[in-house]
Amino acid sequence: MRLRTAVAAAFGALSLLVTVPTSASAATGDFSYMFVGLDGSPQSVALHDPASPGCITLPEVADPGSSEPAFAPHNNTDTWVMVFTEPNCTGDSWTLRPHGHPATDRLKLRSVFLTDRH
């Protein structure tokens, strides 16, 4: 009887560990990019300590039918980042290293995936 109780208690503890959600983490630093505003002038946006890992569709350029893609991404976070040409982390992609130099204006993006790889 004691063995059954011990096994049941161990199984219960294990199931609690598995079902408790893990807390979201964040990359440390800024991920920034440029986009063309409604008035035609370039605008700059910085995501400070963005949640990672995960995909972020850039809201200013999310609709390919009504906006040009963002450009000149700069990964100044402590994690590797993939930038994508389409929303929802689809399309062609490029990888930017942590604390890298700003990318060229020719690199276009509509979404970004922050990894948990430092």
Image (cartoon, rainbow, N blue to C red):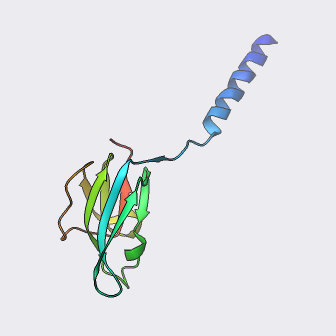
Closer-to-camera residue (27/107): 27
Count of marks placed on residues: 0
Q: Quadrant of residue 11?
A: top right
Q: Looking at the image, which residue is at 39% across and 48% down?
A: 27
Q: Residue at x 68, y 27 (%)?
A: 13
> Can you give x and y, in whole percent of width and height, for residue 76 in the image?
29, 53
Q: Position of residue 59 (x, y in %)?
A: 43, 72
In the rendered image, the residue lying farthest to the right is: 1
Q: Quadrant of the C terminus?
A: top left
Quadrant of the image occupied by residue 43: bottom left
Position of residue 106 relative to residue 66, above or below, is above
Is 99 left or right of 117, judged from the image as shown? left
* Relative image position of residue 98 (x, y in whole percent): 27, 48
Please determine whether, in this image, residue 26 is positioned above or below residue 61: above
Image location of residue 111, percent across then percent down: 36, 65
Q: Taking 79 as reference, is 6 left or right?
A: right
